[in-house]
Image (cartoon, coloured by chain):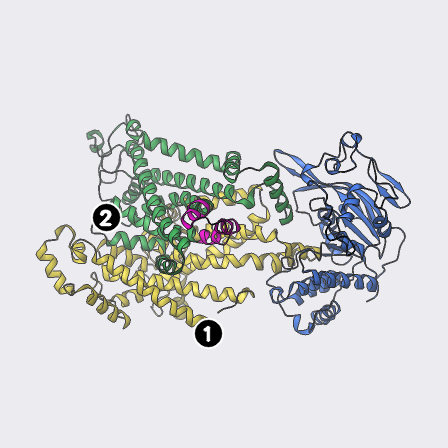
Amino acid sequence: MTPAGARSGDGPLLDVRDLSVRFTRRGEPDTVAVDGISFDIEPGEVVGLVGESGCGKSVTSLAIMGLLPGRGPKVGGEVRFGGDDLLALSDSALRERRGRDLGMVFQDPLSSLNPVVPVGVQITEALTRHRGMDKKAARTEAITLLERVGIPDPARRVTSYPHQMSGGMRQRALIAIALACRPRLLIADEPTTALDVTIQAQILELLRELVAETGTALMMITHDLGVVAGLCDRVNVLYAGRIVERAERHRLFATPRHPYTHGLIGSIPRLDSDPELELPAIPGSVNDNLPWDTACAFAPRCPREIGRCTEVTPGVETAASRLLRCHNPVPATSA
Amino acid sequence: MSAPTTWARRRRARIDDTAQGRSLGADALRRLRRNPVAITGAVIIAVFVLISVFAPLLAPHGPAEAFPQLLDRLRPGEIPGAQDGFPLGSDQNGRDEFSRMILASRQTLLVGVLATVFGLVFGVLIGVVAGAVGGWADTVLMRVTDVLLSIPSLLLAISVAALAARPSQTTVIIAVALVNVPIFARLLRGSMLAQRESDHVLAATALGVKRPAIVVRHMLPNAIGPVIVQATLTLATAILDAAALSFLGLGDADPARAEWGLMLATAQPYLDVRPALALYPALAIIVVALGFTLFGEALREALDPKGRR
Amino acid sequence: MLRFVVRRLVQVVPTLLILSVLLFAWLRSLPGGPAGALLGDKATPEGIAALNRTLGLDQPIPIQYLRYLGRALSGDFGASLISGDPVLAEIGRALPATIELSVTALLIAVLAGIPLGYLAARYRGRPWDNVTILGTLVGVAVPVFFLGYVLKQIFAVELNLFPPSGRLAVDLDATRVTGFAILDGLLTREFDASADAIAHLVLPAIALATIPLAVIVRITRASVLDVLDSDFVRTANAKGLAPGTVRGRHVLRNALLPVSTTIGLQTGLLLAGAVLTEKVFNWGGLGTLIAEGIERRDYPRLQAIVLLGALIYVIVNLLVDLSYALIDPRVRLR
């Protein structure tokens, strides 16, 4: 597989500007799931989007793909991809891009596959639609794809139904579907969360290989910094719908500046840590959040909270390809 | 209402649960009060119940009272319509249709409620025994239930009512109730079984709570929701089934007693002469059945934890 | 597959046996027994005793049951008290009429119900959806026989568009081959007979179809909504498939699974509804046999028809389970 125009053109492949998603409900205040976030992804780059459940990372990915439910949420901002604003495209134009330029892998491989359609057909339907293949060619290609994602005996598996496969195999099939048309960007939304630990590592390894081989850019959405550590070039840390810190992977792990990032990294178990010592955890839950309009949402759970945090919204500081949103960041030398 | 994806629904449900910590019952009630469907159903039911409770006060005449001034004008091909003192005119026997319509609400409610209650009580008993005891009792009870369920419901009611020596209100009630016994039994057994495997029952068992206490305190309250919904919906079908039995000549044989299903059935020969005689009770049945159905559906929606948003 | 069918058919046997025992026991438990019920108000002890002797009811009850069962197994369900004919022959004559009516009603319900339910789900919350839901609720609340009369009054009596009752015009000299009026017309090339049979069929079929239609619309709507919400539809959309492909291959193919089960359960409603509809339209099928049997207390006939109704119901649901296994690969027949 050759990267199809993966590194052509100037500027980022994906440029998300001030994206916001709010859910409106009759008779109740809006729920702001994504609160004006901006980030970009270069061609072939692997970018992480990290945060707890409910921080808006999945909503972000669905908004980029145009897959949010029809009439519920209001989406604002811009999602520039290959010169177009995806949010402004018509449904049919967006359908042309989805699957061809943008692929997506979901969290739960069992529910994400159609239970009554053979896996092979679920691959070939994308091939016949976007790559103009006839049925026979698409079937051959589907077998090649299944083989590439490491499914044994692909010629037989092509007629299998999802329930006849193991969880790991299903996720491999889902990846094969997403990569079938050699998209320029692959979005993976918690692709390993529903899998056994041993399988998780295999799937991550597979993703890493495929990205390197095809030149596809990857947007990795996860709550698990461990996943990010081995895979991503750059990492965005999300909290309550806003990006609180962004940095290159090595610098983020070496010197986390935001107390939240610091806490997340601190709570990863390490082989060399004292087994008697309790793992540090971030106290409280997202329910304690303050509104961003008048404060730092993280303040109630923050060990470094100072008076200003509950009174003034922290501004965004950018320096040397880092981004930080904090009144009282962790000193750069402390980690 | 929007169509949120599963993740959004899960998220909202979680936020609702943890943030506000409402009990399922209070939450259901709150959503019922906001639901126009539930309110419509409740209003219809309330009006119906009020009329039937105060029927003897509201009805100007008795159900069997025939009036000379109506009888005089009653002849083949003519049934007198509305006139002074008789707002809905005469029935086919020279009685006041208006009074009969009002008094009939009481009998209709009686048939519907009794048939539902008997079906419910026996069904719940069978379901609890089968679901709580399991094993041998479960097999036998469910076998019989399956047999009853394998007969189309109205056919079962017909055979029960038809086999009775003389049709009466009692046979109608028994027939309609019997149809509903297996439905309630199956429903309750199903949710009891689900409860038996659930974590909170396992936890109670692990803590050494005695079995009857678990059944009564932990399993029944959680299993009863769908049963209440089914009972509300059954009130509608019971009234309709009773009307169908009357239509087939299996209804109450007492001509003095006014009941909507019976009135509708006995008006059939006079459709050409005065269709209103069928129309009034038919509309009453439709509206009341609709009322119970609307309320039952709204209740089902309100009690569904998936729908808590 | 074959083993599954055989096993299920074997399961039907005890069901029917228990049912026959229940019917039998209920009948014997009546005051005065069936003879008392038969004679009704005119029952005297002497009359009952005489009738009991003629009907063989003076024997011990288990013996009576075994004799009934033995005859029933050889296809002898006794003679109708009304016509004196064997009950089975009566049923055989009436069955085609009921099947013709029920199948037509079911076709109407399925062919109209699935699209209506799908559209309601697709335009969820809009006026169209609300109208459809309200329609289904009202549809279930209207007594079938009343609807039949209303249709008859409007479209047959007032507008004179359709014949008001019966299966064929009396003056039409149609040849009977299979008993299915439409089919017979085609087979004998008496096309006017087929057309006449269809005209007779329209109103009763619509009346009979309302409740199944309402149920199918609601199930389809709920099921489509459920599937639209599911992750695999999101995957299909993420592939950028054409809307038609998403709808057909992903939404409908999954949404119709629960609908197909419902269709099996509807046959029960159809059999029961047929009794009422046939009486309104004087249709002359099983329903008419039942209605007549009720009026005249024809127990052999009723007993046989109830057993037959249960048998049909069970077999149709077996067929539904089999077809379910064909469309859902997850279901394995064991």
Task: Give the alpha-carbon distance from disc 1 to disc 2, as whole Å.
Answer: 46 Å
Find residue C75 and report its horizontal and vertical position in percent. 28, 71
On the image, numbered disc 2 is attached to which residue?
Answer: B167
Chain identifier of the blue chain: A
Chain identifier of the green chain: B
Query: Could you say which is closer to the camera, residue A92 or residue A146?
Result: A146
Whether residue B207 is in magenta: the answer is: yes
Q: The residue tagged with tag 2: helix, strand or loop?
A: loop
Query: Could you say which is closer to the camera, residue C70 or residue A96?
Result: C70
Type of residue at label 1?
A: Leu
Give the letter of the chain under mark 1.
Answer: C
Q: The residue tagged with tag 1: helix, strand or loop?
A: helix
Find residue C294 and report its horizontal and vertical position in percent. 25, 54
Q: Is residue A124 above or below residue A81?
A: below
Q: Main secondary structure of the magenta part?
A: helix
Q: Is residue C27 left or right of residue B183?
A: left
Q: Where does the magenta region start and end?
A: B190-219
- Which residue is situated farthest in the left direction here? C46
Find residue A215 and report its horizontal and vertical position in percent. 84, 61
Can residue C162 be spotted in the picture? no
